[in-house]
Image: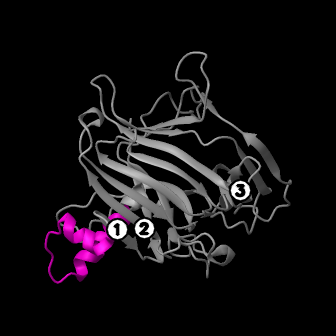
Amino acid sequence: MKNLTKLVLVSSMAISANAMAMQAMDDAALSAATGQDGLNIGIGISKVEIEKLFIHDNDGLTLTGTAAVAGPPALPASADYNGGTSTAGAIVIKGNGKAGDANETKGIVIGANYDNAGAYLLASRNLADLTIDTDAGTTGTGGAFLNIGAQVSGLDIKIGEIGVTGSGALPTAASTSIRRGGVDSNYNAILSGLSLKTGPMSANIQLGAAPQGAMVKLNAQMVGGLEITNLGILDNSTKKGDGSGDSATNRAAGVIHLDSIKVADANSKNLTLNQSISVIGSDGTSAGYLRIISSSGPVDNYVKGIHLGSQGAASIGDVEVQGLQTYFSPAANVYTPGAVITISGH
């Protein structure tokens, strides 16, 4: 949903920047332009790059328990010790520094998936096509609403290194930019990066009222399924020295590296998307949250090339999971196929 919102904003900016003059268009004018009342937007962006992405946690982690004491007398850390300092930290996605790599200096690179002679692209060859309509609705379903039908091309998404760092100082009136960033000397990598390839997707978004039952409805089939490649999970607790790995005192961080992960419907090459996304407001007793309900059916997973210790270590083999189905319980002893995910601040 966030990506679609950003695409709409980028499109709007491009239209504004190139228009010499703008005037209101009524439904009659729109009908003459498109053949149907409403508005169609084709987003012809071939690639999107992001240098760095920071997600700041402004109050950090609250300390619990007590740390170990070297002594004398030596005292171990308490069982509930978590090392929190209540100091702002951030998740960082940045370039991986590998010469010649697409993510050498860019944290995120999003482009079209040109695999299989363009089979995963929209017929328009746009990155996304939007169809926008307004409707009066009914009093029984909440009244008027804006409907956005979105068709998104197959994507080739490359994500650089992901890590954690201390947050930089907030910009002040004297600052020369709005950048906050992080503290480079306090950085630890947690993922070496990954790449995702998707097939075409569609979503329907309703703002205002939502007679479809949720703000965002995904109900489509991702042709070719979902593939994640070159995923590395880092353990910096084993790193020594500068982590270069060129001597006994400079041991590199340990890595669990997965060559690829493929996800598709059970006994299929494609992946069904059937999700409802809603933003739930506060009810006076609990804070609001984002809710995602998935009911897409069982899936097959194939993990290829599992390397323990480093990417260059010998693979322990592949792992295959067939017919994975999750359930959630709307009531005691009731099991509904799917999953419910809630996301909120704390």
Residue 277's place in the image compared with 95, above or below, is: above
Give the amino acid type for the residue marked by disc 3 in the picture. Answer: Lys
Crowding at dot 1, Cα within 10 Å, few <14 / some 14-19 / many 20+, comes out as some
Q: Position of residue 155 (x, y in %)?
A: 55, 67
Image quarter (top left, top right, bottom left or bottom right) of the C terminus: top left
* Magenta span main SS: helix
Q: Position of residue 21 (x, y in %)?
A: 14, 80
Give the amino acid type for the residue marked by disc 2 in the picture. Answer: Asp
Residue at x 34%, y 26% (from the top left corner):
286
Mark 3, secondary structure of its residue: strand
Is 331 in the magenta?
no
Of residue 181 and residue 1, the one placed in the foreground of this image is: 1
Which residues make up the magenta segment?
6-35
Residue at x 34%, y 48% (from the top left corner):
206
Colour basis:
one colour
Give the CA separation, mark 3 to mark 2: 27 Å
Q: Is residue 243 left or right of residue 319?
A: left
Residue 19, picture quadrant: bottom left
Mark 2, secondary structure of its residue: strand
Q: Is residue 212 left or right of residue 104?
A: left
Residue 262 image label: 3
Q: Position of residue 222 (x, y in %)?
A: 60, 58
Crowding at dot 3, Cα within 10 Å, few <14 / some 14-19 / many 20+, comes out as some
Residue 61, picture quadrant: top left
Q: Position of residue 221 (x, y in %)?
A: 60, 55
The residue to which callout 2 is attached is: 129
Mark 1, secondary structure of its residue: strand
The residue to which callout 1 is attached is: 40
